[in-house]
Image (cartoon, rainbow, N blue to C red):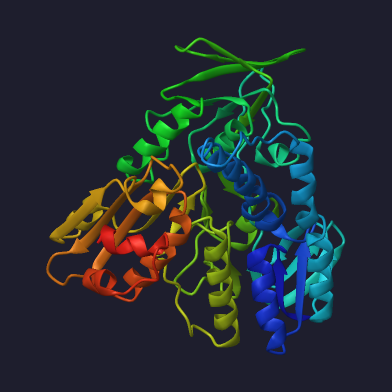
Amino acid sequence: MYDTIIIGTGTAGKTAASILAKNGKKVAIVDNHPSGGTCALRGCQSKKYLINNTHTAAETRALIGKGYESPAITQWNQLQKFKREFTSSVTENTNQSIKNQGIDRYEGTAIFKNAKSIVIEGNKIITADSFIIATGASAVKLNLKESIKPHDSDDFLELEEIPKSIIFIGGGYISLEFAFIAALAGSEVTVLEKSENLLPIFPHSLLLPVIESAKEHGIKMITGVDITSIKEFSSGYRVSTLKHGNFDAVYVMAGIGRKPEIKELNLDSIGVKYDKKGIITDEYMQSSVDGIYAAGDCVNSKMLAPVADMEAEIVAANILHNKSQKVDYNFIPSVVFTFPQMASVGLTSEEAEAQGYKTIVKSGSGSNWMTYRRLEAKHIYYETITDAASGKLLGAHIVSPHAGDIINLFALAIKNGLLASSLRDLPWAYPTYTSDIKYMV
């Protein structure tokens, strides 16, 4: 009998297991995948190896004639080898960490028998006072009648050579990030999106400079596309559409979203409520069944690694001390690693006005700022929203090569109720990318 059994060895599962074990709890962790989870093995960490290096090459190409000759990603297999220097040790290191903390590791698919026990691989039954479901998410598959299934992001991350041409299906953050990786590495790229808008969760004003950058790097972005079939030929693939004709490429990847990995858990039999976005939890991260908690990408919340960690910490705290901590999803920054990056935190101007705020909105291009002139970076944009009555920052939205780093400072400022004037008056270390914040507010 365990105090807590955790299903999933990703960032949420590992975080919760470590906290509980350090506090003297008898903990077991179960997974039917190699230990490490999406972020480290096939997500944010591994893709960043490809993002960093393709973006660096593109930034350097912008400085040709200013001390550089043309750089290019000519050895994709070496870049993959570099990435695997990190990913190849993740599972072993995770398992060793689990063992060192006195946590029992079980291999196999977990199925709930009741609210206090699970069956692993059809025969092994283990029980616990509480459970944490941290099974993560997987790529949504594109299923078309009489069509082959396209590759997904997991497949792309293992490519030994970059294809000469690629069609990306979907206009969300996964598809766009990988589209820029491919294009900057020399592939001919087409993005096909079913809806009329790309990335609807971001303000449209942020998309415009990214779309311009995509055009400059040869990425074709086509919206309002209904795909009817995908056929494979000896030379590659043909994607047929209802009104836009046919598109041919050597490789096709679908990046149409991710779904929670909860189907095999047998949640219906024990009364755990969920929807297509994941397990439904309360403010203490507990499911509809007492003693069964959830954290990470399998939860109906934001699919972000830092959110998974936060949820896991909340779960562990509430298992140790019942209902002692509540989750807070406000002021969580998000980044899309396109070229340039898009980053956002807090309210948009429309959201702020809908909540009754009278706002001061500052927006514009920073392409003439010296920080970006030194990079020959043209597609720079910022938009900040301030409460006119109090002077407090409500939101910030940025497009720049370093938007992901800058947005964290805005998140800190908004979460702590700082005034816009506080950021303007701060004597920032100069010249740095973050010192430009004073111009944005």
Q: Is residue 280 left or right of residue 140?
A: left
Most foreground residue, 115 or 120? 120
Q: Is residue 409 left or right of residue 183?
A: left
Where is residue 108? Give x, y as percent.
Answer: 82, 58
Please tell me whether residue 243 is drawn above or below residue 61 in the rendered image. Answer: above
Please tell me whether residue 145 is drawn above or below residue 178 in the rendered image. Answer: above
Question: Which quarter of the picture shows residue 166?
Answer: top right
Q: Quadrant of the C terminus?
A: bottom left
* Residue ranking furthest to the right: 123
Where is residue 394? Give x, y as percent.
Answer: 26, 63
Where is residue 52? Give x, y as percent.
Answer: 61, 49
Most foreground residue, 410 or 321? 410
Q: Quadrant of the N terminus?
A: bottom right
Q: Is residue 101 visible in the rendered structure shown here?
A: yes
Where is residue 84? Give x, y as percent.
Answer: 79, 51
Q: Is residue 33 visible in the rendered structure shown here?
A: no
Residue at point 40%, 54% (across, down): 371
Residue at point 75%, 40% (across, down): 158
Question: Which quarter of the picture shows residue 354?
Answer: bottom left
Question: Which quarter of the picture shows residue 320?
Answer: bottom right
Please tell me whether residue 6 is drawn above or below residue 65 in the rendered image. Answer: below
Residue at point 38%, 32% (across, down): 197
